[in-house]
Image: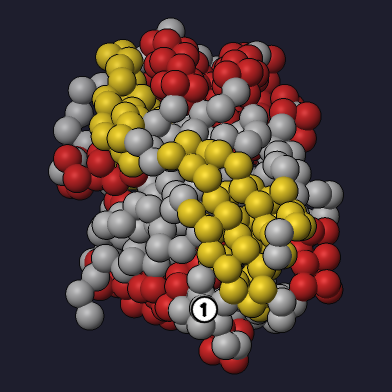
Amino acid sequence: MTDSEWIGETFTSDVGWSHLETLVDVGDRMAGSEGEREAAVRTRDALGEYAEDARLEPFDVQGWVRGDSSIAVDTATVAAADREVIALPRSPSGSATGELVDVGYGLPEDFEDADCEGKVAMARSDVPDWYERYIHRREKYYHAVEAGAAAFVYRNHVEGMLPPTGSVGTEDAPIGEIPAVGVANETGARLARRYEGDAVTVAVDCETPAATSQNVHAELGPDTEERVLVTSHVDAHDIAEGASDNGAGTAAVVELARALAARKDELESRVEFVAFGAEEVGLVGSGRLAETRDFESIRAILNLDGVVRGRTLQFFTHGFDALGEAAESVADRFDHPVTTSPEQSPHSDHWPFVKWGVPGIHVMSETGETGRGWGHTHADTLDKLEPRTLREQAILLTELAVTLTTESYDRADPETIAAALEAEALAEGMKITGDWPYDD
């Protein structure tokens, strides 16, 4: 197949975008829900149109079902309803009362300077431009726990009455230790102005049943011992359509399956497509797969989580220089801008493999925004995305996937990955959230 043929077919294809519409129309795709399973079944069937052995592989997961949440002062509710305050997934059910303390950005030093013992700690979802690193929501939550806070309030930095969601808890203790809610930027401003220093009550109602999630698999290409994994996650938070996070990534995986099926004679190793379940609650699906796979059989991982939000692809290569060179060679060939970074990116489904030295790329896209933007809010909807961006990026990613099958890539020692995390100031946060996998 000539370049003009497969590129033309990809740029005019509606396969990926149609699957994205299918996913967002499912509704709630929370880990362990019926909606997540329906999305997985639809993805399996879509991949089965182009790849072999399309299947679901189920696994147990800690379920979490949302009820009502509120913040009250005395007997008066001051924040309620889903546009002002929502529980963070895997928050425990219950209520806690304490003096409201605004810890600003929730930097480690902010918690050191504040007295949070027995109080309700409120932290913003962003970090200042001058700070050396991004601080994940779960790190802020566990700084509050370590500081003795009675409850945690996570204030969005994005305006528009959009309370943020995002899970708490750890792999060993999936349900968090203290009640946790997300509040809209405007709600947080009002709470800080009117009630800082006053006793407030944070109440969370939820259920925590046993549940089942599943990973979606399909394969294509020659039956080699080594394979390239092309991955995404099919689950999403229950408060929105999950269009960008990560319906778009799964739609792109389906589009790549279509394009690679037409180019399967060019593949020099097996390609396995995986749409993971339960990513949003701690990388559970990818963690389950990593427990069962021989890492030596994985040539490279191409993980699509954050694509299509902006037109310029962004590649995090985790210090695997050859992967960065492969991405840049594709960009040069098509005279299309991309950005590459050798930094570690420990918060998506490539990480259970990369942390042990498996070569992997986390593919995102530049948005010019700080933090998640519309992600993890009610506003993560289909209208924020464009079909042309999905098609353009599918062309680049298809070529990159073919390229990855043609070379073997050196693995890294886990000690090298650990040293990079320390150098990038990421280790501190991973240790406090229970995500540090290495012996010190």
Image location (x, y in percent) of residue 353: 30, 51
Evaluate whether residue 32 shows in this view. yes
Residue hosting label 1? 118
* Kind of residue at badge 1: Gly
Which residue reaches farthest bottom? 113
Above or below: residue 368 compared with residue 162: below
Q: Is residue 199 left or right of residue 267?
A: right
Q: Is residue 67 left or right of residue 320?
A: right
Q: Nearer the viewer, residue 155 or 229?
A: 155
Image location (x, y in percent) of residue 172: 27, 57
Above or below: residue 342 compared with residue 326: below
Evaluate whether residue 126 shows in this view. no
Image location (x, y in percent) of residue 324: 48, 55
At 44% across and 53% down in the image, what residue appears?
Answer: 92
At 33% across and 32% down in the image, what residue appears?
Answer: 211
Q: Nearer the viewer, residue 177 or 409?
A: 177
